[in-house]
Image (cartoon, rainbow, N blue to C red):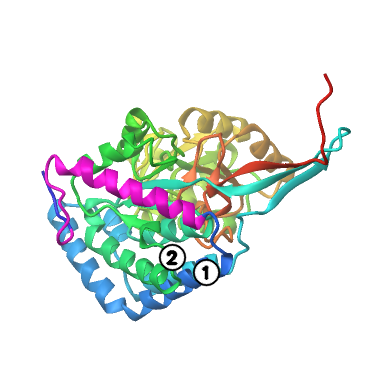
């Protein structure tokens, strides 16, 4: 089994349960400290981590180069390599994300609601940290920074288990976060990175009900399915990003072409990338054909239904191409009978992540929004905006597609629970 550890960490074979137990114990202790830590100290840690990240750019890029070499040896696709790759711009974006999170209002202690009862009791619902969060993710090293920062901002300790492909990059980014904790006088165990590629560590995390309050999986269908099947700890589900763009008969042609191209090609390997374009039958021969040709010209493989196969360069779609997350320069294309047909298709094949409509008809858009229940619904905008940073959250741990507790981008506020504070004045309940 592929293993790599930090210096001095005993992680071979049967030592992994003991190692994970110690990580969990330290995280629980750190969570108790963070729950009462001031916003100033948390923000100081984040700002220092951002400054350290920029100062260590060369070190992070060198670590990432090792990961890219590992990814090439594993035969990762071009889109997956793009998810893994860092450059100065992406490192600066990670650092800016930390600063943006630091600049946000601290959610801990916020009074969400307040009321008084006839009994004289005054009741407040107050935001409180969840405790210890476990994050299991693949490929994207920036998740290390995003998850660590959001957990800290919300007063939670976090245990990070990154993918084997991003092992060295994640370690280098994590070191900058620890530097921030140290500078602010906070426990270094507040943000811990599992120091091994051994998958036995994931198995242990899923069982650590004594130490971990919630698990957030961020990755492909295989990872999320494993976590949902095996976890004894509650899970914030982040399912596949099977994102659709529906082009309505009343779409503005320029907007439609621009949005569909961006939704597919900007970064095809992220969960907000469009995987299927649906075209109203009334505009299939005109605007629909124009969109398909634009995708082909951009280097996208278009897997088309029977109607659109007449366009030269397309590939006949197989039944399993609909409802499939390609994470590559591939898109399924289908003609539907108006917004009703689009809604029916998305209900059948969608993953509840992000779906968009391109139309100038507000009534049609309103029906799309009302009749679909995806975590994110958009009008005349690229699905690539399905991102916590773009929503003003600074960053995100993931896009939650479940319906309990958190939905959509999971930022600092979504990583809190709440408690009730009840004030009386010698108040007793009558018999």
Q: Name the residue under label 1.
A: 41
Left or right: 365 in relation to 15: right
Q: Pick the residue in front: 429 or 300.
A: 429
Quadrant location, the C terminus: top right
Res. 250 visible in picture: yes
Q: Which secondary structure lies at badge 1? A: helix
Quadrant of the rendered structure where residue 177 is?
Answer: bottom left
Q: Is residue 31 magenta?
A: yes
Coordinates of residue 158 in the picture (x, y in percent) = 40, 52
The residue stretch that appears in magenta: 6-34
Q: Which mark is residue 186?
A: 2
Residue 94, horizontal then vertical, whole percent: 42, 68
Q: Is residue 175 magenta?
A: no
Residue furthest to the top in view is: 431
Crowd around label 2: few <14 · some 14–19 · many ≥20 (10 Å) = some
Q: Which residue lies furthest to the bottom in this view?
A: 55
Q: In which quarter of the image is residue 408?
A: top right
From the top left corner, tell me how far across and down residue 98 is, in percent. Answer: 47, 67
Indicate which disc residue 361 carries. Answer: none
User: Are discs 2 and 1 less than 8 Å apart at CB?
Assistant: yes
Nearer-N-terminus badge (2/1): 1
Give the residue displayed 60% in from the left and 55% down from the top. 108
- Between marks 2 and 1, how big is the CA–CA gap? 8 Å
Q: In this view, does 264 lie to the left or right of 129?
A: left
At which x and y percent is residue 423? Answer: 77, 43
């Amino acid at each position: 089994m592929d293993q790599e550890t930090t210096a001095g960490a005993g992680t071979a074979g049967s030592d992994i349960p003991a190692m994970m137990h110690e990580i969990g114990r330290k995280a629980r202790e750190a969570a108790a400290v963070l729950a009462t830590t001031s916003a100033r100290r948390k923000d100081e840690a984040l700002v220092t981590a951002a400054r350290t990240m920029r100062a260590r750019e060369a070190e992070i890029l060198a670590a990432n180069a090792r990961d890219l070499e590992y990814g090439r040896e594993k035969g990762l696709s071009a889109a997956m390599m793009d998810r893994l790759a860092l450059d100065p711009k992406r490192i600066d974006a990670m650092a800016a994300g930390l600063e943006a999170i630091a600049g946000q209002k601290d959610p801990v202690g916020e009074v969400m609601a307040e009321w008084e009862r006839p009994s004289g009791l005054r009741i407040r619902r107050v935001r409180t940290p969840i405790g210890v969060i476990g994050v299991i993710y693949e490929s994207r090293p920036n998740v290390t920074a995003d998850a660590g920062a959001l957990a800290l901002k919300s007063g939670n300790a976090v245990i990070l288990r990154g993918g084997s492909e991003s092992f060295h990059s994640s370690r280098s980014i994590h070191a900058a976060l620890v530097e921030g904790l140290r500078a602010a006088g906070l426990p270094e165990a507040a943000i811990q990175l599992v120091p091994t590629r051994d998958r036995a560590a994931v198995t242990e995390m899923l069982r650590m009900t004594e130490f971990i309050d919630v698990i957030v999986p961020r990755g492909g269908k295989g990872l999320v399915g494993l976590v949902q099947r095996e976890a004894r700890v509650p899970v914030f589900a982040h399912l596949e990003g099977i994102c659709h763009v529906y082009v309505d008969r009343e779409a503005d042609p320029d907007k439609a072409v621009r949005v569909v191209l961006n939704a597919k090609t900007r970064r095809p390997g992220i969960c907000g990338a469009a995987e299927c374009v649906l075209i109203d039958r009334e505009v299939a021969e005109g605007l629909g054909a124009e969109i398909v040709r634009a995708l082909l010209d951009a280097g996208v493989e278009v897997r088309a239904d029977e109607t659109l196969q007449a366009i030269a360069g397309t590939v006949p779609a197989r039944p399993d191409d609909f409802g499939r997350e390609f994470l590559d320069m591939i898109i399924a294309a289908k003609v539907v009978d108006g917004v009703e047909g689009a809604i029916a298709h998305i209900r059948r094949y969608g993953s509840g992540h992000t779906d968009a409509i391109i139309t100038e008809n507000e009534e049609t858009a309103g029906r799309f929004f009302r009749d679909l229940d995806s975590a994110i619904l958009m009008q005349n905008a690229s699905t690539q905006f399905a991102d916590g940073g773009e929503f003003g959250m600074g960053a995100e741990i993931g896009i939650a597609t479940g319906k309990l507790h958190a939905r959509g981008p999971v930022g600092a506020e979504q990583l809190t629970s709440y408690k009730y504070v009840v004030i009386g004045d010698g108040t007793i309940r009558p018999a």
